[in-house]
Image (cartoon, rainbow, N blue to C red):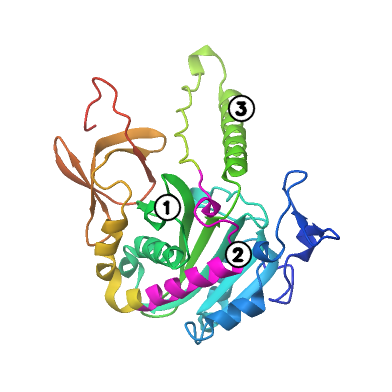
Amino acid sequence: MNNATSSSPDILCAAQASVAADGTESAVGATAGTRLDVASRRLDGERIRSRLSAACRGWGIEVVETTGSTNLDLLARLRENVACAPTVRAAMVQTAGRGQRGRAWQSQPGDSLMFSLAYVMSGGPADLAGLSLATGVAVIEGLSDLPLSAPQALGLKWPNDVLLRGGKLAGILIETVPAGPGRIGIVIGIGLNLRRADDLATRIDSAAASAASAASASGASGASGASNRSPAPTPAVPATPPAALESVFPEPDMSTVLVALVKRLTAMLDRFATQGFAAFREDWEAMHAYGGAAIRIIEHGRDVLHGVALGVDGHGCLRVATSQGERVIASGEVSVRLLDRAPGTQEAR
């Protein structure tokens, strides 16, 4: 099930770039003439393991050239043998990388950092409340350990996005499997944009347009005459525009960024296993990018609530102030956007 195409965890992505005589490379998907530093755009497995040896004792650290999905790789292993955890698995290329709600994660080799962590803890699904938020805290802490020019520009958007100056810098996907009586296996996938946010935005727009066109065609083929027409499709909610780390960390080194994040994430998992979300709630609220802002809650493409973002409760649910009182929103299938309030707009729906 989406196993790595390379049997060795140390084979890196040499096949994904053509190296010129002067030592520069042109990565897959790069525009003609772009000059890229080789080392900073590659994952160095030996260096990564060396720098994580003290902080991540007992963890398996894998770096592969290409795979379908690091999340699916680790989920399959956990189903076979939970003793494989704890493990970190990073790939230069993921051919079937996924984001929330089954969306494809848009990336190009060298431009995005993609990796997953497998971990087993006591308890069940209810004990994982707030884990995606705690993961966001750890990601920002790891990034803040780097020499960023503007660490204060980082923030969190409920429930699982990391923002940089309002744009989406990183996404988090958490999946689980049973791990025996009283235990649960967790796989956390992280995708972080390192470079070329404009190019990423173009690819996201193209993917959204293709999806909308396919949905429209499907609706048209299902109609059988005027009396049986399908309703007009709900307009798609504009995606949060992407951001890239290079705007605050010029020429980010992929291995260095991975090490910084993994150090914080592995420590977070150990702490969450014993203390739960309560240990991270205060930090999350301090990092909340939309705290005190007017927001809209969107479900299945439709606005369902307008209000002011207050923070989160002890389970990681979003607290929203409306004209009808405070509402609590569980993650589910909802999205949050800042509200550009027009004249006459109702505060709560």
In the rendering, at what x and y percent does residue 216 appear?
57, 27
Label 2 neighbour load within 10 Å: few <14, some 14-19, many 20+:
many
The residue labelled by disc 3 is 217
Decide: few, some or many residues near mark 3? Use Cα within 10 Å; few <14, some 14-19, many ≥20.
few
- Report crowding for label 1: few under 14, some 14 to 19, many 20 or more residues within 10 A (C-alpha): many
Of marks 1 and 3, the one in the foreground = 1
Mark 2 — residue?
Answer: 254
Residue 155 located left or right of residue 243? left
Q: Position of residue 327 (x, y in %)?
A: 20, 45
Q: Residue 113: which numbered mark, if any?
A: none
Q: Nearer the viewer, residue 117 or 79?
A: 117
> At 45% from the left edge and 62% from the top edge, which residue is drawn?
174
Residue type at mark 2: give it.
Met
State the image coordinates of residue 185 (x, y, percent, origin top left).
45, 73
| In the foreground, 153 or 118 | 153
| Residue under numbered circle 1 | 161
Could you tell whether 183 is left or right of 103 in the image?
Answer: left
Q: Secondary structure at mark 3?
A: helix
Residue at image position (34%, 77%) is 271
Which of marks 2 and 3 precedes in the sequence? 3
Q: Which residues are magenta?
A: 242-270
Magenta highlight: main SS:
helix
Horizontally, is 176 left or right of 182 in the view?
right
The answer to whether 192 is drawn above or below residue 84 in the figure is above
The verdict on residue 262 being magenta is: yes
Q: CA distance from mark 1 to mark 3?
A: 31 Å
Q: What amino acid type should be assigned to the residue bearing mark 1?
A: Asp
